[in-house]
Image: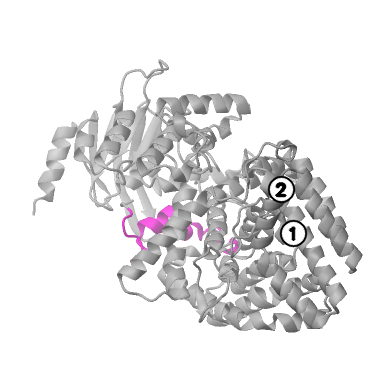
Amino acid sequence: MSSAPILLEAVSVRLGERLALDDVSVRLDQQRIAVIGANGSGKSTFARLLGGLVAPTTGAVSVLGLDPSRQAKELRRAVGFVFSNPDAQIIMPTVAEDAAFSLRADKLPKAEAAARASAALEEFGLSELADRPAHDLSGGQKQLLALCGALIRRPALVIADEPTAYLDARNSRLIADHLLRDGKDQAGDRAHRLVLVTHDLALAARCDVAVLFDDGRLTAVGSPTEVIDRYEASLVC
Amino acid sequence: MLTLYRPGTGWMHRAPAGPKAFVLLVLVLAVSLLPSTYLAAGIAATVTVLGYLVTGLGLRELGRQIVSVRWVIVITLGAQLLFLQTEPAIANTSRVLAAILLAAMLVLTARVADLLDAFERGLQPFARFGVDPARVALVLAVAITTVPVLIRLASGVREAQKARGAGGGLRAFVIPFLVVSLKHADDLGEALTARGVA
Amino acid sequence: MTSEPAAAPAEITPRRSARPVSRLAIDATDIARIAVFAAFIAVLGLPGGFAVFGSVPITAQTLGVMLAGAILGAWRGAIALVVFLALVALGLPLLAGGHGGAGVFVGPTAGYLVGWIAGAFVVGAIVHAGRRRLTWARTILGVLVGGILVIYAFGLPVQALVTRIPLPETALQSLVFVPGDLVKAVIAVVITMTLQRAYPRAFRTDRFVGAGGASAVQSTAGAASGTAPGVSSGTPER
């Protein structure tokens, strides 16, 4: 396999009756990848495929040099996921517990996990809320917590599926800034790679490359402005 | 969070959850085995009152607990008086009541998170039979997280029903509520997988 | 975090498709479903419940017991009830009327609560017997036997024991609850059969986990194939 971070060769995914992805081949080296397209075009399936949540029916997938079919466990340790529904991503009853939850697989000592969780909460401005029940949070705060849970393990790749769909403009902005940051963060670590599925074309424009899906097929790859233009042209009836 | 816990700093609150649960269990069992006599009823009542006093919960809390189980008292006593003599009726009712009130002391003085930890530790011996204590504790924690979410989903369903002028029947409510709950479960399952639960 | 062997071939997909059917493997999807069903039963018992016969409030929680077995199947349904009752024991006021705490397990109704676990199991075992499609007959039988008979079989003796009223009198006294139970049984059957048409992937039970059946019950698969009419408002596309 090549060393490209994301590589798909003739990949199809059949979900029940429907062909969700139809013969997709693509190679993506860029750091921040926007995925756009209409409802049901296959972009969410594409995201889940990269994260090992959906298996390819045919074809070969390589993400970060891993095969999601056979190395799902390793891949999921390298990938952080953010979904759109803030409520369905919170797993533990309190904010601090939920942030620490993602560290379970690392089997850290309790004190160390708690320390890392509180550092991460600090980074996302949630420290004040650490001991509050998670359901007391606003939608935007919940989504920040979900992001915190996804980023706390410093994943090499973050996959975000419509992370701002339930949020108002201000919170969308906040989440997007965290997701799209490049260069080094406070801890001096390199920023994560990002696959961002979104309907918000302004967000897509801030990425390094965009891919366009239509009815399960990948119809365009290129600079965000060009791909967005093409998408918007296709919307004119 | 919705819980029966009453914050406090007395020794009963500071006592570790596991041993506390064990001691109360023994006490409750002892009370349950008392005979059906006035004397036994008096013992049960005395133990309960003393229990609430020495643990610092106080008689006001005891009163609050009695009010919260008033229907159990009414139904139990009513049935007892119908089928039994007065002495066993009163003795049995106070014995049942004492057991309930003593057992309640556990959740009044221990946080859910602490009980959850104690529960996980208590399950360790069962690990050799294939029980995974961490996984059991995880399911409980997820369920605790989910209750308030479903409460909100339920009120959403009811509002939608009202908006459409649909009736308030049980079936008309349960089907859509069940479906949104199951959809929530699917999303949650995906999030669990994404966050490293196999 | 999990006691499962690392070499399990189940990792071909994140779902359970390749797991051996012989043992009860609880994966992430099951954890979510069990936890959500426990919470579902809790919400059915919240105050502001339902007045069925005029103003007599009956708890809808036994309806939840019946549905847990009918929808999750025997094992997962029973586990959902264990989880629900564990939350009650841990002190959450989730029983109808805001009750909770270990006290309820020493009260007169303790046997009924334990009976809920066995009841859900029996409902699931009968409703899903023979891994065939659900039928009205089997669903009715399962709900009546598991959801009513089994629960009373556990509940009445314990009630007699705790209250020290002889069993026949105890049974006589409990007759008043039977009409309500029958109403809930009817509702449970109708809901189960409706759900089979409106939302078939609800039924991800122990027995349907054969090698071939997995894709049809995969959660992502179902969501994408549009099997949820009407109720999916507000959910963005996936």
Residue C210: say if magenta. yes
Q: Name which residue lies at 30% across and 33% down.
A: A174
- What x and y, as percent, mark residue B130? 72, 47
Residue A154 appears anywhere in the view: no
Residue B9: say if magenta. no
Specify the subunit that label 2 lies on.
Answer: B
- Going from the N terminus, do you reach mark 1 or mark 2 first? 2
Q: Residues within 10 Å of mark 1 (few under 14, many from 20)?
A: many
Q: Name which residue lies at 51% across and 61% down.
A: C213
- The residues colored magenta run C206-235
Specify the subunit that label 1 lies on.
Answer: B
Q: How many marks?
A: 2
Residue at the disc numbered 1: B100
Kind of element beneath mark 2: helix
- What x and y, as percent, mark residue B95? 82, 64
Q: Nearer the viewer, residue C125 or C41?
A: C41
Q: Is residue A228 left or right of residue B139?
A: left
Tell which residue pokes out farthest to the front in this image.
Answer: B60
Residue at the disc numbered 2: B58
- Measured along the vertical axis of the image, is residue B107 above or below residue A97? below
Q: Name which residue lies at 84% across and 77% down.
A: B86
Question: In the image, what residue type sits under mark 2?
Answer: Gly
Residue A176 appears anywhere in the view: yes
- What x and y, as percent, mark residue A178? 33, 29
The answer for how far apart the CA atoms under marks 1 and 2 are is 16 Å
Tell which residue pokes out farthest to the top in this image.
Answer: A188
Question: In the image, what residue type sits under mark 1?
Answer: Ile
Quadrant showing the N terminus of chain C: top right
Q: Nearer the viewer, residue B194 or A128?
A: A128
Evaluate if marks 1 and 2 touch, with contact meaning CB atoms under 8 Å apart: no
Q: Residues within 10 Å of mark 2 (few under 14, many from 20)?
A: some
Q: Is residue B115 left or right of residue A169?
A: right
